[in-house]
Amino acid sequence: MPDLDLLFVYGTLKEGFCNFAINGGQRVAGDFITVQAFGLYIVGEPAFPWLVDADPRGLPVQGQLFRVGPKDWPAIDALEQVDEPGWYRRSRIQVRQMTSAEGAQAPPLTAFVYFGDSQALQTRAVHLGPLAAFTLVQQSRYCTVP
Ligand code: PCA
């Protein structure tokens, strides 16, 4: 088994969303939520999902978890433009599986996430947010699933 890292995705890289084909990771079953609150906004033209760290108005954000191998990172990082200023950067956060059992809490796991540059909330159009989840309704402003 090569070294696999966990990636938490909250936007277009989710299964069923328009950039899923670029996501070479293996899905971990279930739905996941961030342990900390973050600001999930719909920003820019076309309108894309943008997660900012340290947002006092933020909420725990829902998404999916993937195991990503070394050969799959370059394509995903390139899509998210991680080397370009003002776009996404990849950081580690804590997430946990969402359980339906009342009162039960799954243990936290450390996973990578793509944060958007928080300055962009000043410089780009902010259409919506903070949100708890990015849905197909919001995605329809950005792209359609083939
Ligand atoms: N793709 C990444 C970050 C935002 C986006 O659309 C994701 O789905 O997590």
Image (cartoon, rainbow, N blue to C red):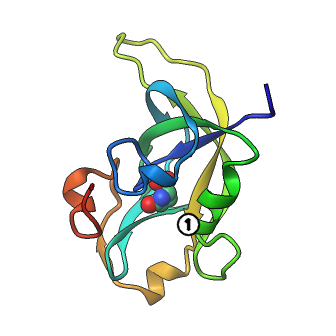
For the point 55% across and 66% down, the residue is 79
Q: Label 1: how many residues lie within 10 Å, few (<14), some (14-19) or many (20+)?
A: some
Image height check: is 146 above or below 25?
Answer: below
**Where, by quadrant of the figure, is residue 144 drawn?**
bottom left
Q: Can see residue 89?
A: yes
Q: Nearer the viewer, residue 43 or 132?
A: 43
Q: Position of residue 18 (x, y in %)?
A: 35, 56
Quarter containing the N terminus: top right
Q: Nearer the viewer, residue 68 or 62?
A: 68
Cβ of mark 1 under 8 A from ligand 1 = yes
Instruction: Please name the residue that numbered disc 1 is placed on.
Output: 79
Image height check: is 71 above or below 125?
Answer: above
Q: Is residue 21 left or right of residue 131?
A: right
Q: Position of residue 70 (x, y in %)?
A: 76, 45
Q: Nearer the viewer, residue 6 or 59?
A: 6
For the point 27% across and 55% down, the residue is 145
Q: Which secondary structure, mark 1?
A: helix
Image height check: is 32 above or below 82?
Answer: above
For the point 45% across and 51% down, the residue is 21
Q: Can see residue 38?
A: no
Q: Position of residue 126 (x, y in %)?
A: 34, 77
